[in-house]
Image (cartoon, rainbow, N blue to C red):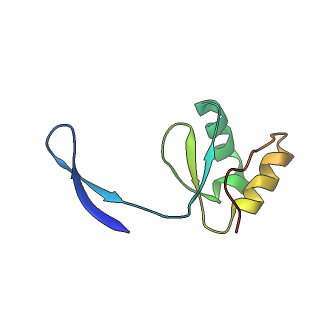
């Protein structure tokens, strides 16, 4: 959903898109996010990086991301429901 441009702090306009029902991976620190992006299987499932700690997951790929994180020895916590 495109909500149009908004005004930035400097008076300019910034294009903004609003997405519903997205899956995010929120890491404890930026180093862990880099580690996830460096892993070939996970990098293909990440659409983008929203901040240094938050990664946007490709639609329909959250289950494989969770499995791969567990293989890496992490214990991901899920908030909300997985469709």
Q: Residue at x 16, y 46 (%)?
A: 12
User: Which residue is situated farthest in the front direction here?
Assistant: 80
Looking at the rendering, which quadrant does residue 21 occupy? bottom right
Q: Is residue 82 above or below residue 30?
A: below
Looking at the rendering, which quadrant does residue 30 occupy? top right
Q: Give the total number of marks visible in the rendering.
A: 0
Q: Residue at x 65, y 32 (%)?
A: 28
Q: As rendered, which of 24 and 42 lies closer to the eye? A: 24
Q: Is residue 14 above or below residue 29?
A: below
75 with respect to 7 (left or right): right
User: Which residue is situated farthest in the left direction here?
Assistant: 11
In which quadrant will I find the C terminus?
bottom right
Q: Residue at x 68, y 38 (%)?
A: 35
In which quadrant will I find the N terminus?
bottom left
Q: Position of residue 68 (x, y in %)?
A: 79, 52
59 with respect to 76 (left or right): left
Q: Position of residue 14 (x, y in %)?
A: 25, 51
Q: Is residue 36 above or below residue 56?
A: above
Q: Residue at x 46, y 63 (%)?
A: 19
15 with respect to 34 (left or right): left
Looking at the rendering, which quadrant does residue 65 occupy? bottom right
Q: Position of residue 34 (x, y in %)?
A: 62, 38
């Amino acid at each position: 959903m495109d909500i149009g441009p908004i005004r930035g702090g400097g008076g300019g306009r910034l294009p903004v898109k609003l997405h519903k029902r997205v899956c995010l991976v929120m890491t404890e620190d930026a180093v862990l996010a880099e580690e996830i992006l460096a892993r070939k299987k996970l990098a293909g499932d990440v659409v983008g990086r929203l901040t240094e700690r938050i990664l946007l997951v490709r639609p329909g790929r959250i289950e494989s991301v969770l499995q791969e994180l567990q293989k890496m020895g992490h214990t991901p916590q899920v908030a909300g429901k997985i469709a």
